[in-house]
Amino acid sequence: FADNYNVTIVTGHPPVFRWVKMYPEAFIPTATEKLEALGHSVTFSEQYGGAIAGVGEELETVEAGLAEIGGCSSLFDPGKMAAQNVTYYTPFASDDVRLVSETMGDLHRTDPRMQQAYADNGVVYIGGPTAIDDYVLMTNFPVNSLADLQGRKIAAPGASINWLAGTGAVGVQGNLTTYYNELQTGVYDGVLVFASAAFPGKLFEVAPNITKAGLGAQFAGSICANKDWWDGLPEDVQEAFRAAADAAASWYIEDLENFVTIAYKGMEA
């Protein structure tokens, strides 16, 4: 028999960012198509940009059942998702976004500790491992040596704030939604960020100096679902949502790889 599924999707970031854009671009169309092929219909309520959950609140929002599906930003939940933050605790590994994404995807499938972190928080990992390109330091002052960082306030997200230990810089917790305004108003002098977000966020206007240190590509989150809701779905419906998560991951990584070069050229110009 046919069912109509009502699904709320939640993210803290707005859809200007690729890891949000992948929902309307790939996840939703694929899920709709797969479910219709099974004879079902689906209605999505897209709650992006802090409409229900702010950045870093997505995991708890999905756990509470306020949304069925969300972008679980493990980067902003290092306490609850320690295993997912492994790349942030091991920087300088690789700037190959696809490699990092696929490696983390494999670990999610094969390492019980990865699954456990979701189960402990009442959610289920359904796919879409989201890696982000090589982190760089963007500042409103030139950096020629570590000495230039002495006493400077640098914003960084989640666990990446640890990278500033021993540099003389003062780490400040921050995220992309506030970087521009806080750089502009002098709350801090620089940010740890990646080119694919820095360019559309116009951070080069307020922090025109870019320092590349090989910090590497990082795993920042995935697509997760409320466990109670998910457990109540028939297996073929679960498969449809998993296929949608795979489609989102493919769309995301391809779009990102094409964009990184454009971002650097754009910022340089």
Image: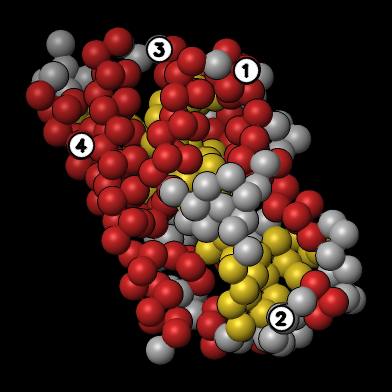
Camera-nearest residue between 150 and 181:
150
Q: Label 4 is placed on what type of residue? A: Thr
As helix, strand or loop, the secondary structure at mark 1 comes to: helix
Camera-nearest residue between 208 and 178:
208
- Mark 2 = which residue? 143
- In the rendered view, would you say 156 is above or below 128? below
- Mark 4 = which residue? 30
- Return the disc, 4 or 2, that comes first in the chain's sequence: 4
Q: Residue at x 13, y 28 (%)?
A: 36
CA separation in Å, label 4 and label 2: 45 Å
- Mark 3 = which residue? 232
- Crowd class of label 1 (few under 14; some 14 to 19; many from 20; radius 10 Å): some
Residue 76: percent from left, percent from top:
66, 46
Camera-nearest residue between 117 and 255:
255
Mark nearer the viewer, 2 or 3 = 2
- Crowd class of label 2 (few under 14; some 14 to 19; many from 20; radius 10 Å): some
CA separation in Å, label 2 and label 3: 54 Å
Quarter of the image where one finds residue 68: top left
Q: Quadrant of the C terminus?
A: bottom left
CA separation in Å, label 1 and label 3: 24 Å
As helix, strand or loop, the secondary structure at mark 4 comes to: helix
Q: Which mark is residue 187?
A: none
- In the rendered view, would you say 84 is above or below 204? above
Disc 1 and disc 3 in contact, CB within 8 angstroms: no
CA separation in Å, label 4 and label 3: 21 Å
- Mark 1 = which residue? 113
Residue 103: percent from left, percent from top:
46, 31
- Return the disc, 1 or 4, that comes first in the chain's sequence: 4
- In the rendered view, would you say 34 is above or below 247? above
